[in-house]
Amino acid sequence: MNRPIVLKIGGSIITDKSSAVPKALPGTIERIAKEVAGASVSNPLILVHGAGSFGHSLAKQFKLKEQFDAKGLIETHRSVKSLNAMVVDALVSAGVPALPVHPLSCAMLKQGRISDMQTAPIYEMLNRGLVPVLHGDVAMDSMRGADILSGDQIVPYVARKMGAERIGIGSNIDGVLDNEGQNIPVVTPATFDGIRKYIGGSSHTDVTGGMLGKVQELVELAGMSGISSRIFDASAAGSITRFLQGETMGTLIQKNK
Ligand code: IP8
């Protein structure tokens, strides 16, 4: 089996993240599904999507980062699961052999970090030409009862365990920007400290850290495993196709030269 590509689609792309109630963007979900279906890449693909307005408002409302709340846990999982079903349905309709993988059911956290995750089913799906679709979720936590599990944490974990070839993070901005709003083409562990002050959190309700959290996880991964990531603007038509075909776009995060 070729080494997989892990692609995360941000919640800000597939939902209206400014909405206080869950609001999907079906046209965009369909466009992305068609681009995935039409891409000619020989690597197996693992998809991860963010929670957007299906997760962050509920997580905040029930204070899920501060306290255990069974009702909040259930409501939030049901909500992100419904977004996942829309994504999987759109992929299947476009001809992609996609299957849902809910992190709540296969991951265990300790103090908010993944301590264990059952990835054998993901491996076997890839082996059989299927496309697992994971998502930002809530998950059980051995110290806190439960916590939020961001897709941004799932991506590097799964990429490392599956020996990914590369990672794509489809965001709503064109990669990492400097203090003048200009794209920074390459970030390495050596340059990260100098640019972290430019990187903001999220402009909307986001309980998992926005852009800084994303970049930090990916810089660590590049440094430790040599797996490179590309953060790119996934709101533009054709962007998913371009990423999958390996084009230069957004910001490349890679190990030190
Ligand atoms: O949007 C967050 O996942 P993310 C998950 O990938 C919840 O950071 C439930 C808010």
Image (tube, rainbow, N blue to C red):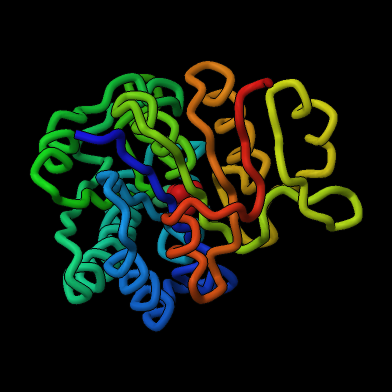
Q: Residue at x 83, y 43 (%)?
A: 198
Which residue is depicted at the point 51% across and 50% down? 169
Which image quarter is the C terminus in? Answer: top right
Residue 6 % position (x, y) = 38, 43
Task: Report the label total.
Answer: 0
Relative to 120, residue 100 above or below: below
Residue 156 image position (x, y, % from top left): 44, 32
- For the point 25% across and 45% down, the residue is 44
Query: Which quadrant holds the N terminus?
Result: top left
Q: Which residue is at a point 59% across and 56% down the rendered structure image?
A: 232
On the question of residue 10 being in view, the answer is yes
Q: Image height check: is 123 above or below 15?
A: above
Q: Residue furthest right?
A: 180
Residue 59's x, y, as percent?
A: 46, 52
User: Taking the image as drawn, is residue 71 in sight?
Assistant: no
Q: Would you say 212 lies left or right of 97 here?
A: right
Name the side, left or right, on which 197 lies relative to 10: right
Q: Quadrant of residue 80?
A: bottom left
**Residue in the foreground of this view, choosing between 174 and 62:** 174
- 183 with respect to 136 (left or right): right
- Observer-nearest of 56 and 5: 5
In the rendered image, residue 137, in percent from the top left (x then y), is placed at: 35, 47
Front residue of this view, candidates 132 and 154: 132
Q: Quadrant of residue 88?
A: bottom left
The image shows residue 161, relative to residue 151, as above or below, that is above
In the shown orientation, is residue 82 left or right of residue 151?
Answer: left
Q: Which residue occupies the extreme bottom position in the image?
A: 27
